[in-house]
Image (cartoon, rainbow, N blue to C red):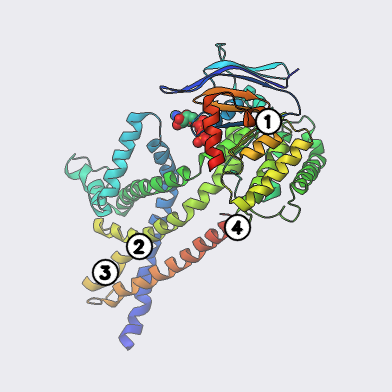
Amino acid sequence: MDLFWEQFPIVVKALNVGFLQTLKLFFVTLLGALPLGLVISLGSMSSFKPLKYVVKFVIWIVRGTPLMIQLLIIYYFPGLVLHNPIWGGGESGRFLAASVAFIFNYACYFAEIYRGGIQSVPVGQEEAGLVLGMTKTQIFFKIKLLQMVKRIVPPMSNEIITLVKDTSLARIIALQEIIWAGQSFMKGSSGISGAIWPLFFTAVYYLISIGILTILLSKLEKKLDYFK
Amino acid sequence: MAILEVEHIKKSFEHTEVLKDISFSLEEGQVLSIIGSSGSGKTTLLRCLNFLETPDEGVIRVRGEELLDAGKATTLTEKAIRKNRLHFGLVFQSFNLFPQYTAKENVMLARKLQAKELPDFKTRKKEIYEEIEKEAEKLLVQMGLSERMNNYPHQLSGGQCQRVAIARALAMKPDILCFDEPTSALDPELTGEVLKVIRELADQNTTMIIVTHEMAFARDVASQVIFMDDGRIAESGDPQEVFNHPKEERTKQFLARFNEG
Ligand SMILES: Nc1ncnc2c1ncn2[C@@H]1O[C@H](COP(=O)(O)OP(=O)(O)OP(=O)(O)O)[C@@H](O)[C@H]1O
Ligand SMILES: [Mg+2]
């Protein structure tokens, strides 16, 4: 037991460093994928057929294959196959590669959610606005947008919570996020080796962050509960 | 002079001709009801009047002013279409209220947006909004909704929703108010309350075009009735005449079906 209390501060410090990287990947992914997803969803609804089908095909590929494979391909393909290691070797290169993979992957999921939200607003809403003499812009901002947001928030919340856990997949390209940090104590790090509890302890970080997110997102959902 | 003149309207969707040469006119303060079987083109006609569809051919005139001549090559700008639309109001079968706004906000929204285009909006904003609010409240009271002004659509019954929708259309002060089967989505016990307010509007000489399957209502409230069949006006005229002594075979069949049912 004494040993545990000796190791504890060392482990927490290392896990905090890893968790910071996890958070960074999480926020960068959101920041990139939320707008990119909207662009992709507009592409997937385009009246220009070739664009629409290309975008739908890409969405199908991205959503139909594991994110882990996408990570590996994006990280290793340029260096091993094209002999052009664009990502560089260090942690920043790994982070960049992971960000690209996560943003693109999540943008495709978000795109489908946006599409669902946009298409769920009945045409009658637009027509009602039109016959009242409103412009298309007014109809979008004053009538449709909030109805879309209301329908987007619940599925979006699910994806965002999944993203928290999915960041751990970046471990596969040795990104030094929290799982990597926890695992390092098994092989040996900071004078501690053969310890498995730090890896298990990472779960606490996930549980707390997901707990906070769940509360925030359900607050948002409740805010939009005043209409149906 | 007639408030509305519709001449030779034709409209096709892809390869089906839905409106085949529709002409009629309507006097100010009069009520026109349009009856006819499903698919005969009644909704399409109302949508043409409200510029939700563009006719392939034909002319629409309001108070002598030509709003549309489909034969002319010039396409209307969005602004012109918006202006034209405001001559007409449309009450939908499915209400199409804006769910995120209360009854009163539904009635005020378009008026408030419109007010922003006024030259003195910035300086008189408060007065203008108060005026709009007062008018909205007055309309809702007239619709029997004084207790429901601050309710959201999902808190209202179908009949109440439809009365909000009528108030919302009236708020724009249209020359001609169109109804597309305003009671078809309602339970029978709620139909009456909506028909009652439409009847009151008729008593106040509101110019209206009412597409309806409520035959008795169409007969009693209208000053003129049109029976549509397969994209044409098969018969039209005085309601008592058309309902009690139909001349055309198609009208007889149609009315017979209703009297049975
Ligand atoms: N946007 C459209 N595209 C193609 N066909 C259409 C479109 N809108 C209407 N139609 C067709 O036009 C015909 C007339 O439709 P419309 O809705 O005007 O009939 P209606 O008299 O209002 O019928 P109902 O009593 O069922 O409401 C129908 O055959 C319909 O299928
Ligand atoms: Mg119809």
Report how far apart the C-alphas of labels 1 and 4 lie in the structure.
48 Å
Q: Which mark is nearer the camera, 2 or 4? A: 4
Res B86 seen here: no
Label 3 close to label 1 by CB (< 8 Å): no
Q: Name the residue under label 1.
A: B240
Q: Name the residue under label 3.
A: A183
Few, some or many residues within 10 Å of mark 4 (<14, 14–19, 20+): few
Residue type beneath disc 2:
Lys
What percent of the width, then of the height, locates residue B84? Answer: 66, 24
* Mark 3 lies within 8 Å of ligand 1 (Cβ measured): no
- Identity of the residue drawn at 74% across and 56% down: B147
Q: Are marks 2 and 1 on the same chain?
A: no
Q: Mark 4 points at which residue?
A: A226
Res A94 seen here: yes
Q: Among all residues in the image, which is located at the extreme top?
A: B72
Query: On the rendered structure, is A19 left or right of B49?
Result: left
Few, some or many residues within 10 Å of mark 3 (<14, 14–19, 20+): many
Q: Which mark is nearer the camera, 3 or 2? A: 2
Few, some or many residues within 10 Å of mark 1 (<14, 14–19, 20+): some
What percent of the width, then of the height, locates residue B107? Answer: 70, 43
